[in-house]
Image (cartoon, rainbow, N blue to C red):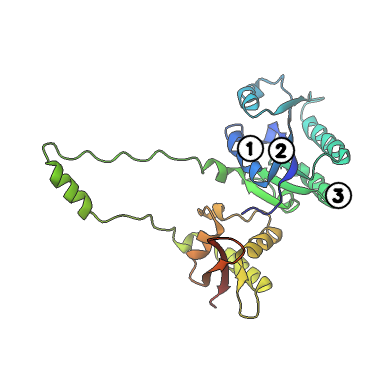
C-alpha cells in the first residue's frame, strides 16, 4: 500500500550487507514510494568479493563509491555512507532516504534523518536487528521481494492421441473451473491479528467501521516492518479477507467513477 507522495529519494546501499541478486526487485519496490534521484552503493571495490556487483550496478544506473578498509576488522564503509547521507540531507535535494542494509550500525543515522523531517525507508534481510527496523518509517524485508518473481505457468497436459476435436471441446466445457484458494488464516500470527484489530479500533467511526487506507498507514507507524507480503498476501485487503474476525465493506467512491472505498471493522 502506497503511503507517501512521489517524493525524491536518496538510495544508499551498503554493499557489504545487501544481497546483489535482488537489486532489480529492490529498485522496483523503491519506485513505489518515490523517485530515486541519488543512487549510490558503498564498498571496497578492490575486494574480489564485490566483483559480481558490476553488471547489476550498470543495469540500474547506481554509482559505486570506493571506500578502502583502513584496518582489518573495521568497517570504513559504514562511516562513508553516513557522512554522505548527512551531506545529502543538508543539500536539500531530497525529501527521503532509502537505506539498504541489514546492519544495525545505521540505526542512529535513520533516527537522525527522521528528526530532520526526512522519510526513511529501510530494506534488509530478515536477520536485520530490530533497533534499525523501528528507527525507520517503513522497513521492507528483501526476502519478500525475491519471492515476488513470476513463476512460469505450467503447460497444460496434452490430450490423449486420437481423441476427436468435438470430444475435446465437450470435455473442456464440462470441466469445472478451478479458482485459486486464498491462503488459510492460520498463516497469520495471533499477535498480528490483535495488532490489526486494535488499529481498526483506533481509527474507527461510531459504528466501528475504519477506512482501510488509514488502517494500513497506522499499522506501518506502529510496526515499521508490517507488510501483508510477509504472510503470503500481495495486498492488505486479501490478508484481511481470510481472517474471520474482520468484516469488509466495499463502498462506492462518489468522487471517482467506478471507484471503491474499502472499510473494515472487528466482528468481535
Is the C-beta separation of discs 2 and 1 under 8 Å? yes
At a point 65% along the width and 80% down the height, the residue shown is 206
Which of marks 1 and 2 precedes in the sequence? 1
Measured from the top left, where is residue 164 in percent x and y?
A: 11, 41
Give the farthest residue toward the bottom. 206
Residue under numbered circle 1: 27
* Label 2 crowd (10 A; few <14 / some 14-19 / many >=20): many
Q: Earlier in the sequence, mark 1 or mark 3?
A: 1
**Quarter assignment of residue 81:** top right
Q: CA distance from mark 2 to mark 3?
A: 19 Å
Q: In this figure, which residue is indicated by the disc labeled 2?
A: 36
- Quadrant position of the C terminus in the picture: bottom right
* Front in this rendered view, residue 150 or 129: 150
Q: Tell me if I can see residue 26 in this picture.
A: yes
For residue 74, say whether it is visible: no
Q: Quadrant of the N terminus?
A: bottom right
Label 1 neighbour load within 10 Å: few <14, some 14-19, many 20+: some
Q: Secondary structure at mark 1?
A: helix
Q: Name the element at disc 3.
A: loop
Kindly identify which residue carries mark 3: 116
Circle 2 SS class: strand
Amino acid at each position: 500500500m502506497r503511503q507517501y507522495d512521489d517524493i525524491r529519494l536518496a538510495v544508499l546501499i551498503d554493499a557489504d550487507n545487501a544481497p546483489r541478486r535482488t537489486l532489480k526487485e529492490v529498485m522496483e519496490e523503491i519506485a513505489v514510494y518515490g523517485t530515486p534521484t541519488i543512487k549510490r552503493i558503498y564498498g571496497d571495490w578492490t575486494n574480489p568479493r564485490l566483483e559480481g556487483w558490476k553488471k547489476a550496478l550498470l543495469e540500474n544506473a547506481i554509482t559505486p563509491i570506493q571506500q578502502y578498509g583502513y584496518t582489518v576488522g573495521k568497517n570504513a564503509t559504514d562511516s562513508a555512507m553516513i557522512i554522505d547521507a548527512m551531506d545529502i540531507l543538508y543539500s536539500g535535494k531530497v525529501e527521503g532516504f532509502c537505506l539498504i542494509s541489514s546492519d544495525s550500525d545505521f540505526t542512529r543515522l535513520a533516527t537522525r534523518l527522521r528528526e530532520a523531517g526526512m522519510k526513511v525507508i529501510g530494506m534488509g534481510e530478515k536477520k536485520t536487528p530490530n533497533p534499525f527496523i523501528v528507527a525507520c518509517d517503513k522497513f521492507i524485508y528483501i526476502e519478500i521481494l525475491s519471492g515476488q518473481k513470476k513463476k512460469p505457468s505450467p503447460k497444460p497436459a496434452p490430450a490423449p492421441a486420437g481423441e476427436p476435436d468435438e470430444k475435446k471441446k465437450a470435455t473442456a466445457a464440462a470441466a469445472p473451473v478451478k479458482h485459486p484458494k486464498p491462503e488459510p488464516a492460520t498463516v497469520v500470527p495471533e499477535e498480528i491479528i490483535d495488532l490489526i484489530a486494535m488499529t481498526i479500533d483506533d481509527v474507527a467511526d461510531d459504528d466501528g467501521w475504519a477506512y482501510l487506507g488509514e488502517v494500513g498507514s497506522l499499522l506501518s507507524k506502529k510496526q515499521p516492518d508490517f507488510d501483508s507480503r510477509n504472510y503470503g498476501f500481495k495486498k492488505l485487503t486479501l490478508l484481511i479477507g481470510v481472517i474471520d474476525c474482520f468484516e469488509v465493506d466495499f463502498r462506492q467512491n462518489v468522487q471517482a467513477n467506478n471507484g471503491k472505498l474499502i472499510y473494515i471493522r472487528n466482528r468481535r
